[in-house]
Amino acid sequence: MSECWRQVILNLTKTPKASAANGLNSGQSLPMHTTALVLFSGGQNSTTCLAHALTRYERVETIAFDYGQRHRVELDARLRVLHALRARFPQWVEKLGDDHLLDLAVLGEVSETSLTRDTAFQMEQTGLPNTFVPGRNLLFLTLAAALAYRRGLQVIVTGVCETDFSGYPDCRDDTMKAMQLALSLGMDKRFLIETPLMWIDKAQTWAMAASLGGAPLVDLIAEHTHTCYLGDRAHRHVWGYGCGECPACALRANGWAGFMRQQVGR
C-alpha cells in the first residue's frame, strides 16, 4: 500500500494501534458504541473476541459462515461454546443475542485450497500457505457489515492478527482499516472494525482469555473450541482437541506452552 493511501485510511478510520501489552486493538470503543457483531467460528481466537465483546458492549450477536470448510466440525463446536458461555457466565447471558449462520458455499466452489479440498498442507509459489482462502475475510466482513446494518449493530469484531498468522494478506491491519473505510462509505454507516488480537500472539491470547473470564474461560476454550484444520476431535491435548500436526494445532500448542511459562514465571 502506498504511503499516501495509508495516511488517508489512517486519517479516516481514526483507530489508533494499541500496544501488545494491553491486548486490545486499535478499536477502543467509544461511548456511543453499545452493540457488536462478532465473527464467531468457534475457535480459540473468535471465542476470546466474543468474551472481549461481552465485557464491553450491551448487546452482542454472532455470525459464522459455512463455506464447505474441511474442518466443518468448527460449526458444531461453536454451538457448544455458546451453550457453555451461557451456562458458566450468567453475567453475559442477557448481553448475548442472536446467532447467525450464513451459507457461503460459493466460496468453497471457487477456492482450490487445503481448507476446502482434501490436499496436503504446503507452501505455494506465492509464498503463502495453501490454507489461504483468497477473499475469505473480505467476504466475511462484507456480509457481516450487511447483517450489522440490518440489525443495528455498530461494531464488527474479528479475531485476525498480524503476530501469530501465516502471512494471510486479509488478516493485516492495513486490510482491516481499508475494509472499515470501504464498508462505512459503501453503506453510508460508520462501522468500527475491532481487532482485539491484532498485535498479540497466541500465548497472549490465552492470557487475555484468563483476564476476561479467569480459569473457567480458559478451560472452556481448551475443551470446547476447535482450531484443527483436519477437524480432529479424537485427540485431546492439554490445549484442546486436534491432530497436533497441522499449522493451526502447532500455533495453538506453542501458544499454550508460552502461556504456561508465563504462569510459572509469575
Image (cartoon, rainbow, N blue to C red):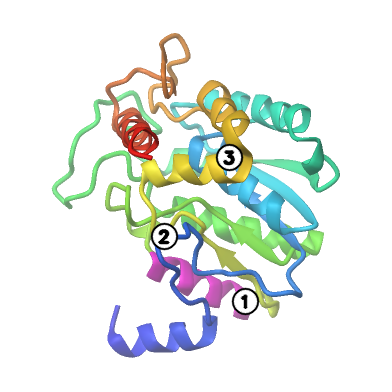
Asked which secondary structure carries label 3, the reply is: helix
- State if disc 3 and disc 1 touch (CB < 8 Å): no
Quarter of the rendering containing residue 193: bottom right
Quarter of the rendering containing residue 118: top left
Q: Which residue is more in the foreground, 261 or 91?
A: 261
Name which residue lies at 41% across and 10% down. 235
Magenta range: 173-186
Amino acid type at circle 1 is Ser
Q: Position of residue 75 (x, y in %)?
A: 59, 29
Q: Position of residue 220 (x, y in %)?
A: 59, 27
Q: Position of residue 82 (x, y in %)?
A: 70, 32
Q: Which residue is more in the foreground, 56 or 175?
A: 56
Residue 134 visible to an observer of this rendering: yes
How many numbered discs?
A: 3
Question: Which residue position holds label 3?
Answer: 47
Amino acid type at circle 3 is Thr
Q: Is residue 105 left or right of residue 2?
A: right
Instruction: Answer with mark 1 or mark 3, whichever residue precedes in sequence.
Output: 3
Residue 174 colored in magenta in the image: yes
Q: Residue farthest to the right?
A: 94
> With respect to residue 207, does 171 lie above or below?
below
Name which residue lies at 72% across and 42% down. 100
What distance separates the C-alpha of mark 2 from that of mark 1?
Answer: 29 Å
Q: Residues within 10 Å of mark 1 (few under 14, many from 20)?
A: some
Q: Which residue is more in the foreground, 87 or 120?
A: 87
Quarter of the rendering containing residue 203: top left
Q: Is residue 33 left or right of residue 212?
A: right
Q: Is residue 191 left or right of residue 161?
A: right
Question: Which residue position holds label 2?
Answer: 21
Question: Which residue position holds label 1?
Answer: 184
Residue 39 visible to an observer of this rendering: no
Amino acid type at circle 2 is Ala
